[in-house]
């Protein structure tokens, strides 16, 4: 009984130690995983996920820095594949980084490649609203770029071939042949009239020289005309100054004459007043003489008795 009890105690102790070790290992593993990795979310809407699986490698510049944690289809913010990755905490994933799927041509296995921007942006740490982890934008691989370029080249090549076919149609070939024949005829005509063309070119050259000489003469004439105009302008300015001086002198003389006329007017007024007085006195004397001459009897014999004398009253 004691041996059985002892074995039971030992077994219980071993089981307890085993459970504690397992719990410790899980705790250490979970703690280490939380410390050693950072999680990011990527939404792929343009690229195929063929060959990508959980635990597929995540690389940066060809070096593995993490792995794929999970992926699933989502419809918001757009229909895409949501891929959650975890990378080493020392991996510098910066704002503006892009992720794309890189696929091995031989094996078909896919990895996620992350490319940072070239401008040394700050680290990507901000988590958008409604997201659990920071979001890395979807990019495009070099293979995709080459495929797009090849597709564009093929499309452009097809357009070029179509245009060449249109250009080389039977109708256009006939027109080209006609044009070439016309060009040959024109070339032959020019060759046969070479001397005439040379004479025409020489005439154009002579005319050009004459135009050049005429231009020089016109420039000289313009210079002389400008000098003459400047001289006329100077003479006109001098004449204007002299006219201004003469007008000022005339104004002063006009003021003096006006003052003299005013003085003469005042003097003449006094003389006219005195003259009018003398005229009035003479008129009275003439009136009296007229009265006396109107009665010659009184003038010869003197006034009658009934006639009053000077100063007398009735």
Image (cartoon, rainbow, N blue to C red):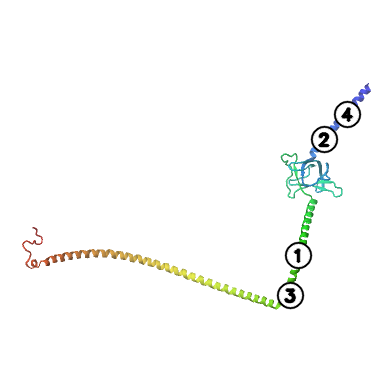
Horizontally, is 112 left or right of 293 in the view?
right
Q: Quadrant of residue 88?
A: top right
Q: Which residue is mark 2?
A: 28
Q: Which residue is mark 1?
A: 171
Disc with the residue nearer the chain's start (3 vs 1): 1
From mark 4 to mark 2, how far is it between C-alphas?
20 Å
Q: Residues within 10 Å of mark 3 (few under 14, many from 20)?
A: few
Q: Quadrant of residue 91?
A: top right
Closer to viewer: mark 2 or mark 3: 3
Camera-side residue of 6 and 23? 23
Q: Which residue is mark 4?
A: 15
Closer to viewer: mark 3 or mark 1: 1
Which residue of the protein is positioned furthest toward the front in this rendering?
171
From mark 2 to mark 3, how far is it between C-alphas?
98 Å
Horizontally, is 165 left or right of 223 in the view?
right
Q: Could you tell me which residue is drawn at 78 percent across and 57 percent down?
A: 158
Disc with the residue nearer the chain's start (1 vs 4): 4
């Amino acid at each position: 009984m004691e041996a059985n009890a002892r074995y039971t105690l030992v077994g219980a102790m071993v089981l307890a130690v085993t459970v504690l070790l397992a719990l410790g290992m899980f705790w250490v593993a979970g703690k280490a995983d939380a410390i050693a990795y950072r999680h990011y979310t990527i939404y792929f809407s343009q690229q195929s996920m063929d060959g990508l699986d959980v635990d597929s490698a995540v690389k940066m510049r060809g070096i593995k820095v993490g792995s794929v944690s999970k992926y699933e289809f989502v419809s918001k913010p757009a229909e895409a594949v949501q891929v959650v990755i975890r990378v080493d905490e020392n991996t510098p994933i910066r704002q503006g980084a892009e992720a794309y799927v890189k696929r091995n041509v031989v094996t078909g296995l896919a990895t996620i490649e992350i490319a940072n921007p070239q401008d040394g942006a700050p680290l990507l740490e901000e988590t958008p609203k409604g997201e659990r982890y920071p979001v890395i934008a979807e990019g495009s691989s070099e293979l995709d770029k080459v495929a797009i370029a090849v597709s564009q080249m093929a499309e452009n090549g097809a357009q070029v071939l179509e245009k060449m076919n249109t250009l080389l149609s039977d109708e256009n070939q006939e027109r080209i042949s006609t044009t070439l024949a016309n060009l040959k005829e024109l070339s032959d005509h020019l060759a046969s009239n070479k001397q005439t063309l040379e004479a025409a070119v020489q005439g154009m050259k002579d005319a050009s020289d004459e135009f050049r000489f005429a231009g020089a003469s016109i420039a000289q004439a313009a210079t002389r005309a400008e000098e003459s105009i400047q001289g006329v302008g100077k003479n006109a300015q001098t004449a204007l100054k002299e006219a201004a001086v003469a007008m000022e002198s005339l104004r002063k003389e006009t003021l003096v004459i006006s003052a003299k006329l005013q003085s003469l007017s005042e003097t003449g007024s006094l003389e006219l007043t005195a003259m009018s007085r003398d005229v009035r006195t003479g008129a009275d004397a003439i009136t009296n003489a007229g009265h006396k001459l109107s009665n010659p009897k009184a003038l010869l014999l003197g006034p009658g008795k009934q006639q009053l004398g000077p100063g007398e009253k009735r």
